[in-house]
Image: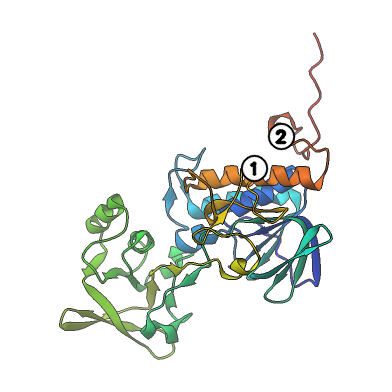
Amino acid sequence: MSAVVRAVGRPDVMAADVAVVGAGPSGLYAAYYAGFRGLSAVVVDALDEPGGQVAALYPEKLLYDVAGHPAVKGRQLIDSLVEQTEPFGTEYLLGRTVVELDRRDGGWTLTTDDGARIAAGAVVIAAGLGRFVPRRLPCSVPYEGKGVAYHVPDPRAHAGRDVVVVGGGDSAVDWALALAPIARSTTLVHRRNTFRAHEYSVRQLHASPVRVVTEAEVVACHGADRLERVEIRHGDQVSTLPAQALVAALGFTSGLGRIADWGIELEHRKIPVDRAMSTNLPGVHAVGDVCTYPGRVPLITVGFGEAGTAVNHAATRLRPGTRLAPDHSSDLLPGARPGTAAPAASAA
């Protein structure tokens, strides 16, 4: 992550105009837009770095459906979103989970799993579809952090290694393709003979140097201090492959976690919102894939619009008399904060 993140330690109580729960693309844009509207923001996320599922599952994958970017890697998109928040002093509480939400003095107090508290006037829930809790291979658990991982933050870290990737979805195929030109060898193991990944990616996979083993599974891991090799069962045969790295791309368990205990109305494990992106709790909004309303389309760019809508409505609630529609960003002086309009052109 090249952009600078103002991560803070464990304060007893923090205060912010807007608390954003979730540091995925929608949450990061909500934090930026809070700053754009002159509001302070703190972002809380269970992962140790911003980016949500984009950073955890496909940081090196090219995204083609983000407005203004013909193609952008997931990591680059997150870096840009973090950089966009920097002028406003956005603070980040990373590696923490919000476990309680309590109404206090017309606003809200959020409590994290390590006891930190955030007093906020408004809350934007941008937690995606759920927590990133990877599905594990039983045999690989003893080697977690010793060669076994569940995502690939930086493919270059696997240069010169024999890598085995397990899974049949987009993440597994994308990581295998990204590792193929870097690792000494790359093997993709999938328990079925068909893939859930995008058809174009699967065609690339079969045309790549990746060894593809289908209708197979990893049944054992071996090594002294670190992973050294894995056993693969294919039908009645068991073979052994060298493996200094095993990427178990088996997906993640989804669920709202403690959010479901906050008194928020739910609809099929999602949060229904109105046109202001408001939930049934006053001052609490939901954006991104965690929210639902008739006709919603699950796109990153849709989440950006929802984040802007939520924050603009929060601004009018927190600052009575504030206009819902913000100033045009093109009217700002270079380097100026929102609210500082460029001088009108003089008449000739």
Q: Quadrant of the N terminus?
A: bottom right
Q: Nearer the viewer, residue 158 or 84?
A: 84
In the rendered image, which quarter contains the C terminus? top right
Query: Image point 37% across, 88% down: which residue?
Result: 223
What residue is rendered at 23% in x and 68% in y? 192
Query: Where does residue 284 sit, x and y in percent of width and height?
Result: 69, 55
Q: How many marks?
A: 2
Residue 164 percent location from the top left of the image: 33, 73
Specify whether 27 is left or right of 347. Answer: left
Left or right? Give the position of 335 relative to 155: right
Kindly indicate the quadrant of the structure image that contains residue 71: top left
Residue 48 in view of the camera = no
Q: Position of residue 34 (x, y in %)?
A: 72, 48
Q: Secondary structure at mark 1?
A: helix
Check disc 2 and give the amino acid type. Answer: Ala
In the image, taking residue 21 as reference, residue 191 lies left or right, namely left
Nearer to me, 280 or 208:
280
Q: Can you say whether 266 is above or below 332 in the image? A: below
Task: Please indicate, yes or no, whether residue 280 appears anywhere in the rendered image.
Answer: yes
Image: 56 above or below 314: below
Task: State how the image is colored.
Answer: rainbow
Q: CA distance from mark 1 to mark 2?
A: 9 Å
Numbered badge on residue 309? 1
Residue 81 position within the rendered picture, expressed as x and y whole percent measured from the top left? 61, 50
Outermost bottom residue: 224
Residue positioned most to the top? 348
Q: Residue at x 36, y 85 (%)?
A: 139
Which quadrant of the view contains residue 220? Answer: bottom left
Residue holding disc 2: 325
